[in-house]
Image (cartoon, grey):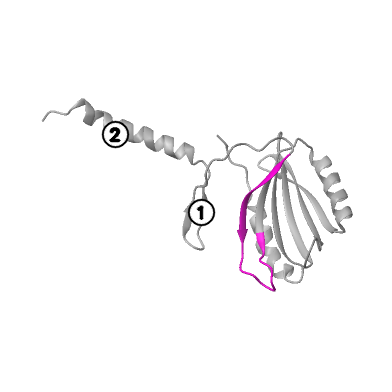
Amino acid sequence: MRVSARSRLMPAVALACGLLASSAAASEFRDAQFGFSLAPPRFGAPAEGTSLVRLVVAGPPDGGFSPSVNVTVQETRTTREAFVRLSESQFQEAGLKLHSKENRTVSGRPAVLLDYEGSISGPRLRFLALAVILPDRVLLATCTGLASTYPSLEPSFRQSLDSFKLTPSP
């Protein structure tokens, strides 16, 4: 039986196409609760000094508000200490109460966990936020719920933020 050059080349081409496709869709969200995954488009990089919300996951509404977790990418160079000072200043300006702050390390990088509460433009909310300080940006994962339901949400919020880790980026 004679095997053509084309037949021998096809597995290599298929492998190369698969590698290219997997590198193009480097991000993937997997939802085990509802049984789906999604690879979002690869958008351009945000400009220095800007921020973007990279991920939002919301729960069912309760009392007119859906608890949520989001990850914001802040394109700014800072230190953990400077980030905390700026956050405390912003909280005070907005009338938010800081309950606690805890320095942490996430995947070897400096981080801080902030627990704060207040009304921005609506119901009283409670926030639990983890800021991971990278050389060129801050990754900010924030869990938000109604202050009145926060005690029942707090364990799952803390578990979610405790699972946050850095992964290699292309």
Please determine whether, in this image, residue 164 is positioned above or below residue 147: above
Viewer-proximal residue among 112 and 38: 38
Give the magenta range: 50-68
Q: Dividing the picture into quarters, in which one does residue 167 lie?
A: top right
Q: Position of residue 31 (x, y in %)?
A: 52, 57
> Looking at the picture, which amino acid does disc 1 mark?
Arg
How crowded pointer 1 is (Cα within 10 Å; few <14, some 14-19, many 20+) is rated as few
Q: In this view, does 83 lie to the left or right of 30?
A: right
As drawn, the label of residue 11 is: 2
Q: Is residue 65 part of the magenta span, yes or no?
A: yes
Residue in the picture at 49% in, 41% down:
25
Q: Where is residue 114 in the image (x, y as percent from the top left)?
A: 78, 53
Q: In which quarter of the image is the N terminus?
A: top left
How crowded pointer 2 is (Cα within 10 Å; few <14, some 14-19, many 20+) is rated as few
* Tag 1 secondary structure: strand
As drawn, the label of residue 30 is: 1
Residue farthest to the bottom?
A: 63
Q: Is residue 57 left or right of residue 100?
A: left
Q: In which quarter of the image is the C terminus?
A: top right
